[in-house]
Image (cartoon, rainbow, N blue to C red):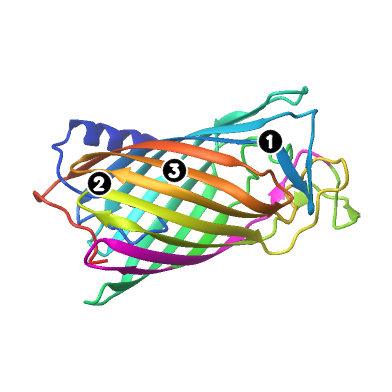
Amino acid sequence: MKLLYKLILVLVGGVCMNTYAQMPHDAIYMNKNSICIAATYANSQWSEYWENNLKRENFNIGTHTTQSVMPMIAYGITKKLNVLAGLPYVSTKTSAGNLMGQKGLQDLSVWVKYNMVQTDNGLSLHGVLGGSVPVSNYVKDFLPMSIGIGAKTATARLVAHYKHKSGFYITAHGSYIFRSNITVDRDAYQADDRVYNTNEVRIPNATDVAARAGYYKKGIQAELFIDKNTCVGGDYIRRNDMPFPTNNMKATGVGFYGKFQPKNIGFNVMARKVIDGQNMGQSTTFSVGFLYQINFKTKSAVTSKN
């Protein structure tokens, strides 16, 4: 955390230059020695959820709301190799019932992104490695009120990208997410139609795939996307029971992302709707973000030739 605060102070006191923000799933890069700081607020709500494959409501919960504030930093080691880090503060609440909402710092995530292949006709291939670790002792097995499941993760991602000289592009990525076991504050738990007499819970690994199509030129970006997040195995929410970290959670979502960043300061917005799922809520998410960027050595910064 001390390093994060120092970087923020450096950015606030620095000279602004023209660079471009990026994410762990895109083909945009900071130039060498460039830094971007971003802060995003997100609000996600659902009133219906899938209990296994049965879509239903629970009037003891009403509408479930998750809010988060996500500070994020990206740094250009070279114009082809970037590192990103983020740490969200998350809170949950419901509009009915007596379940107590949770709040606090969630998981610190770090990503390394590398432009492996770049062609003159606009095609590029990118490799991304990432990981996350919980930074606070939040309650893991109090879903849907928990702010996370508390597992350490390691992610391998491959991103394929094509951009036409007009500014139109398509991007696709696929990820595999390794997730560690967790410990919970109980002596036994029920999963897979059996009772486990231990406080160690096995969390299923997961996959993440997405396709995006949009336009990006002269500081303006707009895209439509579809994504799917799927656990590799796991069990199901029992009838009229609460969810548990071992559940086989699946979600398919569609959405829009837009960004306006003509120079060093920019803004972005995102909207996403879950259209199909399993063992989780049918959520609608909106977010808005602020971007501030700086280059320490040069007077300009560029993206990759994507």
**Disc 2 versus disc 3: distance between alpha carbons?**
22 Å
Task: Name the kind of residue labelled 1 in the image.
Answer: Val
Task: Name the kind of residue labelled 3 in the image.
Answer: Met
The answer to whether residue 16 is left or right of residue 63 is: left
Task: Name the chief secondary structure element in magenta.
Answer: strand
Residue 259 magenta-drawn?
no
Quadrant in which residue 13 is drawn: top left
The answer to whether residue 262 is left or right of residue 225 is: left
Q: Looking at the image, which residue is at 88% across and 45% down?
A: 239
The answer to whether residue 14 is left or right of residue 117 is: left
Q: Which region of the structure is painted magenta?
A: 159-186
Q: Earlier in the sequence, mark 2 or mark 3?
A: 2
| Horizontal and vertical percent position of residue 39 | 38, 36
Q: Which residue is mark 2?
A: 35
Q: Looking at the image, which residue is at 87% across and 40% down?
A: 240
Q: Is residue 227 above or below residue 125?
A: above
**Disc 1 versus disc 2: distance between alpha carbons?**
34 Å
Asked whether the beta carbons under mark 2 and mark 3 sit within 8 Å of each other, the answer is: no
Q: Secondary structure at mark 3?
A: strand
| Horizontal and vertical percent position of residue 73 | 34, 44
Q: Which residue is mark 3?
A: 270
User: Looking at the image, how many numbered discs can be counted on the residues?
Assistant: 3
Residue 266 tag number? none
Task: Name the kind of residue labelled 2 in the image.
Answer: Ile
Q: Quadrant of the C terminus?
A: bottom left
Q: Which residue is mark 1?
A: 139
